[in-house]
Amino acid sequence: MFRRAFWFTAGAAAGVWATTKVNRQLKKLTPESLAAQAADKAVEAGHRLKGFALDVKAGMTQREDELNDALGLHQDPDRPDNVTALPGPRRLRAIENTKTTYRPNQSAVTYDRNEDH
C-alpha cells in the first residue's frame, strides 16, 4: 500500500511540475510577452549601439589630436569655433600659395560639354 501511495504522489508531483512548466512557456509565447521581449532587446541593442558610437567618437578625437600634434597644428583658443589654425610660418606659405597666376594659354582653351556625349 505504501508503494502505491508513493507512486501516486510522485505522479501527481510530476504532473504539477509539468503543468507549471508548460504554462510558463505558454505565457512567454503570448503576443504581449513577445512584444515586451522585442522591446527589451531593441532597448538593449540601442544602448550597445550608443556605447559603440561613443567609443568611436573618443577614438576619432584621440586620433585627430595625434595627427594635429604630428602635423604641428594647434587649437587657437581665440577663435570661437575652435577651428584648427596653421602656425605662423605655414600660414604665410599657405596664404602666398593662394595667389593665382594668369595663364593666357588656358583662357584660349574652351570646354564644350556636348563633346562628351
Image (cartoon, grey):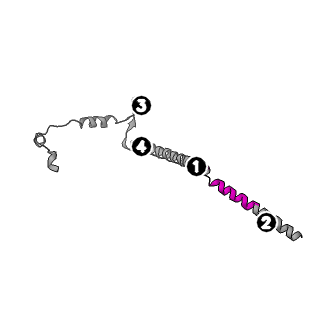
Start-end of magenta stretch? 16-32
Q: CA distance from mark 3 to mark 4?
A: 17 Å
Q: Residue furthest right?
A: 1
Where is residue 93, by image quadrant?
A: top left
Label 4 or label 1, whichever comes before in sequence order: 1
Label 1 or label 2, whichever comes before in sequence order: 2
Judging by the rendered image, the residue that carries numbered circle 2 is: 11
Q: CA distance from mark 4 to mark 2?
A: 70 Å
Judging by the rendered image, the residue that carries numbered circle 1 is: 35
Query: What type is the residue that disc 4 sits on?
Result: Glu
Instruction: Characterize the magenta stretch by its predominant secondary structure.
Output: helix
Label 1 or label 3, whichever comes before in sequence order: 1
Instruction: Look at the image and tell me in which quarter the N terminus lies.
Output: bottom right
Label 3: element kind? loop
Label 4 or label 2, whichever comes before in sequence order: 2
What residue is shown at x 82% (from left), y 68% (from top)? 7
Judging by the rendered image, the residue that carries numbered circle 4 is: 64
Label 2: element kind? helix
The label number, if any, that marks residue 77 in the structure image: 3
Q: CA distance from mark 1 to mark 2?
A: 36 Å
The label number, if any, that marks residue 5 in the structure image: none
